[in-house]
Image (cartoon, rainbow, N blue to C red):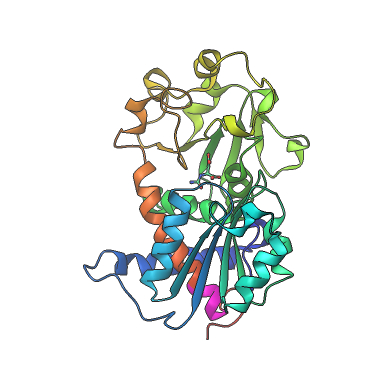
Amino acid sequence: MKHLISAGDLGRDDALLILDTAEELARVSERSIKKLPTLRGRTVVNLFFEDSTRTRISFEAAAKRLSADVINFSAKGSSVSKGESLKDTALTLEAMGADAVVIRHSASGAPHRLATWVRGSVVNAGDGTHEHPTQALLDAFSMRRRMGRLEGLKVAVVGDVLHSRVARSNVLLLSTLGAEVTLVAPPTLLPVAVENWPCQVSYDLDAVLPKSDVVMMLRVQLERQNAAFFPSAREYSRRYGLDRQRFAKLHDDAIVMHPGPMNRGMEISAEVADSPRSTIVEQVGNGVTVRMAVLYLLLGGAIGGEVK
Ligand code: NCD
């Protein structure tokens, strides 16, 4: 495989190879000197057209730990604000010799188009409301580390599924890896044709919580909501927020996840977010390791083929 655009492109063996490679690379991240020479002389471009904290820094750290040269591009302050198209921006990067382009864009499908224009590998770091495959991989990695398995794990993904690329990529990847996903949201925040996704759907968080091993809370994406999807923030929290009372309904080993950034007090209370059973900070650390594995395997040509 040359690109990573959709979590659905990953078969079980490819997905497990990424997670297992990340597990090996995690040992490097625990050392005081965190660098490996693997991608020396290769160039990774981070092309960010949409705001990002975690994902952008995480890809940068991952590429640097593998000794790649990193070029960070953000649309603000670039010629994109002068109206330069994605294609011309891509061709400019091509001319600079990018071996991999990591792209985040507000348009669903932008990484797919980019892959037809550049010679290097394209990694989707979030395209509109479509997909975010490396987030799903780091979530699966974090779940496997905490729970010891993915097969048969019961995962509830809760909240603004409609606008969430994280939810879509997680459903695709987790179903490939044998976990059982239930999406929980008000009917207005579920995408059309969700019944065709490989998961269950529920409107009732209180009924799903006691049966879940993992609860993944999603950010309410107010910046993508062009209409009123729920009556008020307070009403949303009352029915779909994870607060202390609801947290108490989980079994003792269950964990709570969130991709960040959080709206504390809306989809998750501060107390739950900061509890020892929350993996939110761990997810960020695991993100670097998993992205190292993705860059290493894509640039080494080992996903979907022989290890070189
Ligand atoms: C997510 C994203 O950008 O899709 N965040 C992330 O990458 N960690 C989720 C979100 O914005 O809510």
**Residue 278 picture location, percent across and down:** 36, 38
Q: Nearer the viewer, residue 286 or 113?
A: 113
Q: Residue at point 62% right, 52% down?
A: 81
Magenta stretch: give its range. Answer: 296-301
**From the viewer's perspective, is residue 72 above or below residue 258?**
below
User: What main secondary structure does the magenta stretch of the protein show?
Assistant: helix
Quarter that holds the N terminus: bottom right
Q: Residue at point 41% right, 80% down?
A: 38
Q: Residue at point 37% right, 22% down?
A: 248
**From the viewer's perspective, is residue 214 above or below residue 228?**
below
Any part of residue 17 in sight: no
Q: Horizontally, is 61 left or right of 111 in the view?
A: left
**Residue 86 picture location, percent across and down:** 69, 60
What residue occupies the far front of the structure in this picture? 82
**Residue 193 picture location, percent across and down:** 78, 37
Q: Horizontally, is 137 left or right of 37 in the view?
A: right
Q: Nearer the viewer, residue 92 or 274?
A: 92
Q: Nearer the viewer, residue 196 or 103?
A: 103
**From the viewer's perspective, is residue 182 above or below residue 7?**
above
What residue occupies the far bottom of the structure in this picture? 308
Instruction: Tell me where residue 78 sits by quadrant.
Output: bottom right
Q: Residue at point 41% right, 21% down?
A: 243
Figure disc tally = 0
Any part of residue 202 in sight: yes
**Residue 63 picture location, percent across and down:** 43, 69
What residue occupies the far left of the structure in this picture? 32
**From the viewer's perspective, is residue 288 above or below residue 190?**
below
